[in-house]
């Protein structure tokens, strides 16, 4: 870790900027010298999240993963209960029925644009607490909804607040876990985000059949209240710039030296910093080739997943005569596939990345060039396999259901879809976290917006797609859309231009020296890429 550099008290200041009378003048922006910069201690700094006791890191990761699981569970738990609630509210509108499920995902699209930048201004913890309370209130509103319009509104509210752990959870884990150990931890965190929407309809089918559709929301409310209280008691701040600023403030008070500044301080006023952090996810989404391409991958994956959620009920009733209770079985293939995908990624990602880094360093030694260490591209080798696996699963699911083979066969096809979705999602999330590091929450927020819009919109036209083409040709069309992504994945693995080779000459934003240095330290991407596009 970087060495802590602090100035002594004002009585022993060096001659950096003095008035004719000999008094020290305030030093701002690029004028601040190293002795006024506060960084982490050279040796294990107890305030740095990497130095926390294992139990504290584990408890933070488990709580964040638990809330991520719960908010993802809420997205689809109501799916089997939609026919019952539509009957209660006396509506036969199929688009409205699908919207009751997908409007929650629209909230997932709206929330990240605020929660991610707010977490980079005020720290992660306060954002978690506010959003946890908002989510719990939202699902209580769903449980008490007197009309379908009220249900849609409260679903959107709960989705907006519920997007928080899925948006900044990856950033929190990056704050606590070093890059070389991050893949397995991230896999455990992400499995909740992807497996919960699959478990949700299974659980929701049994709850709806036994206690009615409102019981789904009461279960979410009870679990949400419990996790909210536990996180208020145990969760600790992890965001490095916030922690270092807090350390700097303490040292200013202890030494009386008002010139001390955090190494990660951007040198901006609060209003400038707020504006920059609020617009960063939008700038990433519109100006970063990496975010744009990765958002395309995740939009297709997430859209397909929620198309499965909203179509399973009708298709398995139509083709196999499943009851409400049995509908949960239709989601088992996606669930089993997700667990297999996690196992594949956890077993291979860190090992593959370290092997590729070692091979690259060996070539650098042979050529006498500088070693580059681990690069984000080393997370991408499983990506083509994931895309092909998903396309294969769509074909198996579609055509075996079309020919009405035994119901277990299309469910086995969805297992391959689950494997592909999970591996693809993990590859992309790890790639973005390793690329953007200190701005990981904003990067994840950017592609979360796109995936959520796709997850909300595609199911609305999915049933019409199947009505027009049939489940066989409909799924063939969906699989064909996946195939070009294989070539894009190979390009992403081989081309660093999209990530690193952006000319600094285009930069027009003045960045204080201390901030530029901190970005270079925290990101393997390099200063130029982050300064030009997002700071």
Image (cartoon, rainbow, N blue to C red):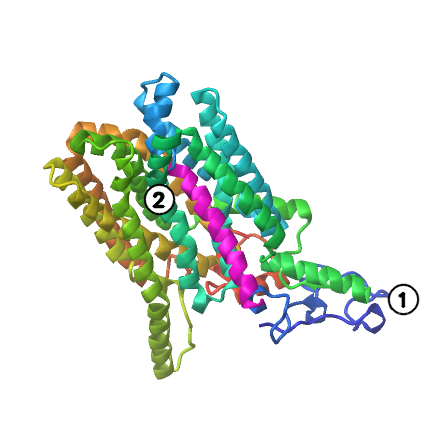
Front residue of 363 and 469: 469
How crowded pointer 1 is (Cα within 10 Å; few <14, some 14-19, many 20+) is rated as: few
Front residue of 54 and 102: 54
Q: Secondary structure at mark 1?
A: loop
- Residue 199: which numbered mark, if any? 2
Residue 174 in view in this figure: yes
Q: Secondary structure at mark 2?
A: helix
- Name the N-terminal-most of marks 2 and 1: 1
Residue located at (24% from left, 57% from top): 385
Measured in 3D between alpha carbons, the distance from the residue under mark 2 to the one under mark 1, in whole angstroms, is 72 Å
Indicate whether 441 appears above or below 16: above
Which residue carries the number 1 mark? 21
Horizontal arrangement in the rendering, residue 175 relative to residue 301 (left or right):
right
Secondary structure that dominates the magenta span: helix
Horizontal arrangement in the rendering, residue 233 relative to residue 303 (left or right):
right
Q: Quadrant of residue 100?
A: top left
What residue range appears in magenta? 52-76
Horizontal arrangement in the rendering, residue 341 relative to residue 185 (left or right):
left
Which residue is the extreme one toward the top? 90
């Amino acid at each position: 870790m970087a060495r802590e550099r602090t100035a002594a008290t004002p009585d022993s200041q060096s001659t950096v900027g003095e008035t004719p009378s000999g008094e020290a003048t305030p030093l701002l922006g690029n004028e601040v010298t190293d002795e006024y910069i506060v960084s982490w201690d050279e040796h294990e700094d107890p305030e740095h999240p990497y130095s926390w006791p294992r139990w504290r890191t584990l408890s933070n990761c488990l709580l964040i993963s638990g809330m991520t699981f719960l908010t993802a569970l809420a997205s689809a738990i109501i799916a089997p209960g939609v026919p019952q609630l539509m009957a209660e509210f006396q509506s036969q509108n199929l688009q409205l029925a699908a919207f009751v499920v997908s409007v929650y995902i629209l909230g997932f699209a709206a929330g990240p644009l605020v929660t991610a930048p707010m977490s980079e201004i005020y720290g992660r913890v306060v954002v978690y607490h506010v959003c946890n309370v908002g989510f719990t209130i939202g699902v209580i509103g769903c449980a008490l909804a007197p009309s379908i319009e009220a249900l849609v509104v409260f679903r959107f509210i709960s989705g907006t607040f519920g997007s928080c752990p899925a948006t900044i959870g990856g950033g929190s884990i990056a704050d606590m876990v070093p890059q070389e150990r991050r893949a397995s931890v991230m896999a455990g965190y992400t499995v909740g985000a992807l497996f919960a929407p699959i478990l949700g309809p299974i659980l929701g089918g049994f709850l709806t059949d036994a206690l009615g559709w409102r019981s789904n929301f009461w279960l979410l409310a009870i679990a949400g209240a419990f996790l909210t209280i536990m996180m208020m008691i145990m969760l600790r701040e992890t965001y490095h710039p916030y922690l270092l600023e807090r350390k700097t403030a303490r040292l200013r008070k202890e030494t009386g030296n008002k010139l001390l500044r955090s190494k990660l301080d951007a040198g901006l006023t609060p209003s400038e910093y707020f504006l920059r952090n609020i617009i960063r996810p939008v700038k990433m989404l519109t100006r970063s080739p990496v975010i744009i391409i990765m958002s395309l991958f995740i939009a297709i994956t997430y859209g397909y997943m929620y198309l499965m959620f909203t179509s399973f009920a009708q298709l398995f009733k139509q083709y196999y005569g499943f009851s409400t209770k049995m509908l949960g079985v239709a989601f088992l293939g996606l669930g089993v596939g997700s667990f297999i995908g996690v196992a594949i990624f956890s077993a291979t990602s860190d090992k593959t990345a370290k092997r590729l880094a070692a091979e690259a360093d060996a070539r650098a030694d042979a050529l006498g060039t500088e070693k580059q260490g681990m690069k984000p591209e080393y997370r991408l080798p499983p990506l083509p396999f994931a895309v092909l696996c998903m396309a294969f699963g769509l074909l198996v699911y579609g055509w075996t259901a079309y020919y009405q083979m035994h119901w277990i066969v299309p469910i086995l096809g969805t297992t391959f879809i689950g494997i592909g979705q999970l591996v693809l999602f993990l590859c992309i999330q790890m790639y973005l976290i390793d690329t953007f590091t200190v701005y990981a929450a904003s990067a994840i927020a950017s592609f979360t917006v796109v995936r959520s819009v796709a997850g909300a919109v595609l199911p609305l036209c999915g049933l019409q797609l199947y009505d027009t083409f049939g489940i066989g040709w409909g799924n063939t069309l969906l699989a064909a859309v996946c195939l070009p992504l294989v070539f894009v994945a190979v390009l992403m693995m081989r081309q660093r231009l999209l990530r690193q080779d952006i000319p600094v000459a285009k930069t027009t934003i003045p960045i204080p020296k201390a901030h530029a240095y901190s970005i270079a330290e925290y990101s393997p991407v390099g200063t130029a890429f982050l300064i030009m596009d997002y700071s």
